[in-house]
Amino acid sequence: MTTHTDERKYACDICCKQFDEACELQRHKLVHTDKSKHACNICSKRFTTRRGLKQHMTIHTGERKCVCTICSKEFGHSIYLKQHMMTHTGEKKYPCDICSKRFTTHRGLKYHMTIHTGERKYACNICSKRFGRPGNLNKHMVVHTRQRKYTCNICSKQFGQSSYLKLHMTTHTGEKKYACNICSKQFARLSYLRSHMVSHTGEKKYECDICSKQFAHAHNLKQHKLVHTGVGKHACNVCYRQFTMPSHLNRHMAVHTTERKYACAICPKRFKCSSNLNQHMVIHTGERKYACDICFERFIRASNLNQHILLVHKG
């Protein structure tokens, strides 16, 4: 059996793609000869080998006869089970030669490499937006079709992707499996944890090309740029003041009402805005999530940290 190395000795004489095994090269060459003679009788998709068609048919039949002996997860083909088993063994034999990150499958490594190369060969045939992975293109397509076939069995909210439904379910279950290794704060999504980490590092890598103001997140820069363009498309229907973001308009609307619908669960105090309630809660929890990167003193609010830096370290 050929072990994984950087050297691949079987090369296609048409497109120069390289393979570890001669049989892999032989199967690949059918792509150039267009001998896709095995057709699915349900969706008409064609395959170069009978094995490829057989594997594809499990999508339609739902047949999952390969079962993981550790977690009982089922798969339609043995190759998918074999790949899955690596999640239990921890085996990752395909390393990236740029950043040394390792992957359980060659396909995973191949998709990862697009991060370094910037290659986006999968294009949407409607808006021409391009993607590095076919899965990301498939997820994008629901923007155009608006098909939402995944329904939450608790609140009936619908989603275009099963992954979106899975993330949504955490709002009902309260599951937060991603924890910060510095302050132990937990998050439902990995993206939320990554966003949170900049509160510890203080990194602001997104800079406005007009005023040079820096931001920790791309969406904050995008919102900020509306200040320069003057685009205020969200208008208050009471005083007609305009705002660049709907969230800013929602906060502003509290000016026109006396209702304080956000109540503290610990003390009787009530607030007009949820953001004000969140700020208030740190009085009870004592959480100090804003850390000075010079002396490591911690603060309840970002404004207190900024004031500390100005008075103590820049005074």
Image: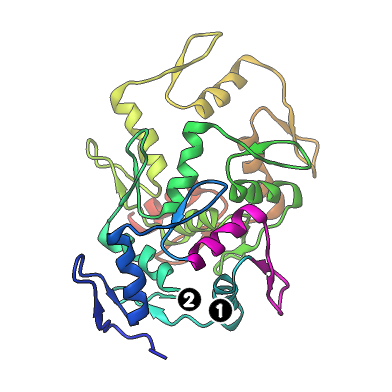
90 on left or right of 65:
left
Sequence-wise first label, 2 or 1: 1
What's the mark number on residue 104?
Answer: 2
Task: Give whichever of 205, 265 is nearer the camera.
Answer: 205
Residue ID at (44%, 16%): 242
Mark 2 surroundings: few (<14), some (14-19) or many (≥20) residues within 10 A: some
Figure quadrant of residue 74: bottom right
Task: Give whichever of 176, 10 is nearer the camera.
Answer: 10
In which quadrant is the N terminus drawn? Answer: bottom left
The residue beneath circle 1 is: 86
**Vertical position of residue 53 compared to residue 134: above or below:** below
Local SS, label 1: helix
What's the mark number on residue 226?
Answer: none
Q: Tell me, yes or no, whether the highlighted magenta stretch contains residue 67.
A: yes
Residue furthest to the bottom in view is 1
Mark 1 surroundings: few (<14), some (14-19) or many (≥20) residues within 10 A: some
47 on left or right of 250:
left
Q: Given contact means CB atoms under 8 Å apart, are the residues at marks 2 and 1 in contact?
A: yes
Identify the magenta region.
Answer: 50-75
Give how far across and how far down residue 268 sits, in percent: 80, 36
Q: Amino acid at mark 1?
A: Met
**Vertical position of residue 214 compared to residue 285: above or below:** above
**Vertical position of residue 138 compared to residue 229: above or below:** below
Give how far across and how far down residue 291 sits, in percent: 49, 60
Give how far across and how far down residue 196 sits, in percent: 51, 55
Q: Amino acid at mark 2?
A: Thr
In which quadrant is the C terminus drawn? Answer: bottom left
Local SS, label 2: loop
